[in-house]
Amino acid sequence: MINPLNAAAAYATTAAKTTGAGMAPRDGASFGEVLEQAAKESIGTLKKSEDMSAMAAVGKADLNDVVQAVTNAEVTLQTVTAVRDKVLSAYQEILRMPM
């Protein structure tokens, strides 16, 4: 099975080595940095949902807040899964390219 982190690292390494005619200097965040920030935000959303669920179990949270947090976590997980699938698909397509 292909590891998504290895795929992202391979992309970042290749992008860092790519220079030459037609290549403009890069400004802003790199692909790896954007991916890292998105992963951190996703983990934060999932942890918030877990905390809200735990608070609801002991009766310290409003049911509406718990439902909203769990729904946000579900959407986040679906998004992360879709992005992972696209990254792996792109990586596999790159591997099939002739050298």
Image (spheres, grey):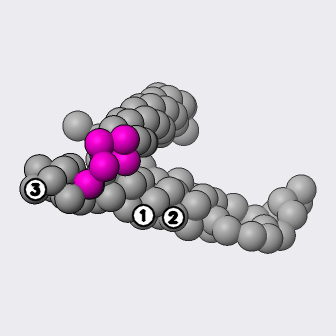
Instruction: Tell me which numbered mark, 2 or 3, is placed earlier along the sequence.
Output: 2
* Residue 13 visible, this angle: no
Q: Do the residues labelled 2 and 1 touch (CB within 8 Å)?
A: yes
Q: What element carries label 3?
A: loop
Q: Which of 30/18 is in front?
A: 30
Residue visible at 15% across and 53% down in the picture: 59
Q: Report the magenta stretch's main SS.
A: helix
Q: What residue type is labelled 1?
A: Lys
**In the rendered image, the vertical position of residue 59 relative to residue 83, given as above or below:** below
Q: Which residue is drawn at 42% across and 63% down?
A: 40
What is the number of callouts on the image? 3
Q: Name the residue nearer the viewer: 73 or 4.
A: 73
Mark 2 crowd level (few <14, some 14–19, many ≥20, 10 Å Cα): few
Amino acid type, mark 2: Gln
- Residue tagged 2: 37
Of callouts 3 and 1, which one flags the residue occurring earlier in the amino acid sequence? 1
The alpha-carbon separation of the residues under discs 2 and 1 comes to 5 Å
Please provide percent x and percent y for residue 56. Answer: 19, 50
Residue 58 got which mark? 3
Residue at image location 20% in from the left, 59% down from the top:
60
Q: Where is residue 85 in the image (x, y as percent from the top left)?
A: 41, 32
Q: Which of marks 3 and 1 is in front?
A: 3
Residue 45 found in image quarter: bottom left
CA neighbours of label 3 inside 10 A, class few (<14), some (14 to 19), many (20+): few
- For discs 2 and 3, the disc positioned in front in the rendered view: 3
Q: Quadrant of residue 16?
A: bottom right
- Magenta segment boundaries in residue numbering: 61-66
Q: Nearer the viewer, residue 65 or 46?
A: 65
Which amino acid type is shown beneath numbered disc 3?
Answer: Val
Q: Name the residue under label 1.
A: 40
Q: Position of residue 6 (x, y in %)?
A: 36, 54
Q: Give left or right: position of 11 versus 54.
A: right
